[in-house]
Image (cartoon, rainbow, N blue to C red):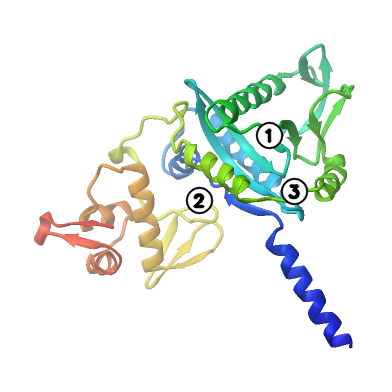
Amino acid sequence: MAGSFQVLLCYTLLKERKWAMKKIKEREPSTELKVLRLLNPIMKLSDYQHYLNLEKGYIGELKLDEWLDGLLNNCLVVNDLLLEHKGKIFQIDSLVIFQSIIYVFDSKYHEDDFYLDANKWKTLAGKEITNPQPQMERADSLLSQLLQQRLNVNIPIESFLVFTHPEFYLYNDPPTLPAIFPNQFHRFMKKMNSMTSKLNRSHESLAEQLVALHLNESPHTRLPEYDYEQLKKGVVCGECASFMIERGRVWVCAGCGCKEYAQIAIIRSVEEFKLLFPDRKITSATIREWCAVKGDRKKIIRTLNNYFKRIGQGPASYYID
């Protein structure tokens, strides 16, 4: 009898899980952040603070993802959307599609104590930051227009600022502020998980259409000028961004001690080179210089031959995916 109950319980849980939260689009770093991460160890960034701001923002978005992983209800999660409507570009950190409502979440990773002075956001030390609410409301309005005018969808939208840093606090916040603070995460998640929500193919179609409209590149990307000849050469650790030292069949990080097989380290460096210089040909001589490999050049050739397709013969040959 007990065995039959366990089988029934497992079947019920699996059946419920089938219709539980589903991620339609995962989050990944922007191309801008990926490039700046690669450039930071090998050159002096002209706007280092901008890079730090991007890193900080991405950490906040990952914290938002961790919170949304608590969703057990029937819903669709779409992360990291860059959309355009009538020539206006807007970003959505995360949106969650339920049966009869869409929640839009705008991640904020501010750290400190803040207060509101009219519509101005200030730290207790008097430092002012940009009011995040107008930007959120702009995205809310544009998303609503896009859904109604282009996708013929009339599901209501509710947008929230989500403050994901545990050491953030806002004094004198008005009850009407559309915000979720760390001490409200559990209660709001409980609310979402208790909503009545039955999804069908139209909900999935909506999520898929939004992903199809996603822009891969932002027109507001800010990258410094960089030149191959001026960049420091060598294999950079994927964990701590320090330079690695060649030790036979492995590379060892001079910073954290992380070890990586030589072929894997070289292939990773090739992928980084391709991101930084998409128009340059991949040749054995170039990659040998890029990785600062000393001695036997055949190890570079063997690795490239194993993982890429060679075009041509001799010194003029190059490699493609």
| Amino acid bearing label 1 | Ile
Count of number-bearing discs? 3
* Marked residue nearer the N-terminal end (3 or 2): 3
Residue 309 vs residue 115, the one in the foreground: 309
Residue 69 placed where, x, y %? 72, 53
Residue 208 placed where, x, y %? 53, 45
Name the residue tied to disc 2. Answer: 241
- The single residue placed furthest to the top in the displayed view is 118
- Label 3 with label 1: CB-CB less than 8 Å: no
Residue 84 placed where, x, y %? 50, 27
Residue 182 vs residue 113, the one in the foreground: 182
| Distance (Cα) linking label 3 and label 2 | 28 Å
Closer to the camera: disc 1 or disc 2?
Answer: 1
Give the crowd class for mark 2: few <14, some 14-19, many >=20 residues within 10 Å.
some
Name the residue tied to disc 3. Answer: 67
* Marked residue nearer the N-terminal end (3 or 1): 3
